[in-house]
Image: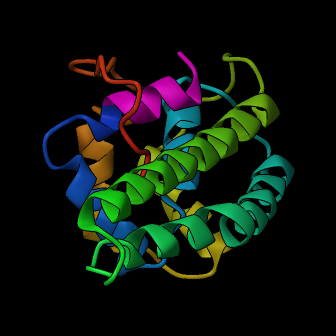
Amino acid sequence: MTAWDFAVALYARPGVEAVCLRLQDVDGQCVPLLLWRLWSVREDRNVEAEVVRRAVEFARTWERSAIAPLRQVRRRLKAPFPPVAAVARAALRGEVAAAELAAERALLDALDALTPEPGGALLDALAALRALGALWGRAPSEEGLGRLVMAAGVEGPLAEPRRSATNHDAPACG
């Protein structure tokens, strides 16, 4: 399973979208980066500290350059913008949302490519996400991380997801 497939399946689970949006909007986290790290732990991939640091720096740059600007435009297009017709504005907003989703997927695909094959040491998912949040620069909420880990069915040795999504167009974060 790729990081993208994992993110899409996890995001489709009940309550995960709200947790991701809170981690993003309240805690200032990069949700695709958190989902990548959760996936790497779940898949038993031993990601060295240096790779995690490189992943954080790449994600930070990509977030600033591509994802955040698209998200800002998409959110601004939610409100009426006379004299632009509501239908035209909504259509443009949909195109921007698709570009934002493509940027998130590009990030997850790039992070996936940095990740070693399965076969490393078992890690505690919550501890791995806490450490990643600290590298990002802001501590994410324990509640949010805990809910994300629980939704992924991860506790120590990781379980298979309870169900998978069929919609591969679900955003990794909102």
**In which quarter of the view is residue 110 placed?**
top right
Along the line of sight, which residue is nearer the eye, 102 or 136? 102
Q: Is residue 92 in the magenta section? A: no
Q: Residue visible at 53% across and 30% down?
A: 4
| Above or below 137: residue 156 | above
158 on left or right of 50: left
**In which quarter of the view is residue 170 placed?**
top left
**In which quarter of the view is residue 123 placed?**
top right
* Residue 105 rendering spot, x and y as whole percentages: 59, 39
| Above or below 70: residue 168 | above
* Residue 80 rendering spot, x and y as whole percentages: 26, 79
Q: Main secondary structure of the magenta part?
A: helix
Q: Is residue 6 in the magenta section? A: yes
164 on left or right of 5: left
Q: Which residues are magenta?
A: 1-9
Q: Residue visible at 79% across and 43% down?
A: 48
| Above or below 90: residue 28 | below
Quadrant holding the C terminus: bottom left
Residue 91 visible in the current orientation: yes
* Residue 30 rendering spot, x and y as whole percentages: 54, 63
Q: Residue visible at 50% across and 64% down?
A: 130
Q: Residue visible at 44% across and 57% down?
A: 92
Along the line of sight, which residue is nearer the eye, 165 or 159? 165
Total marks placed = 0
Along the line of sight, which residue is nearer the eye, 82 or 49? 82
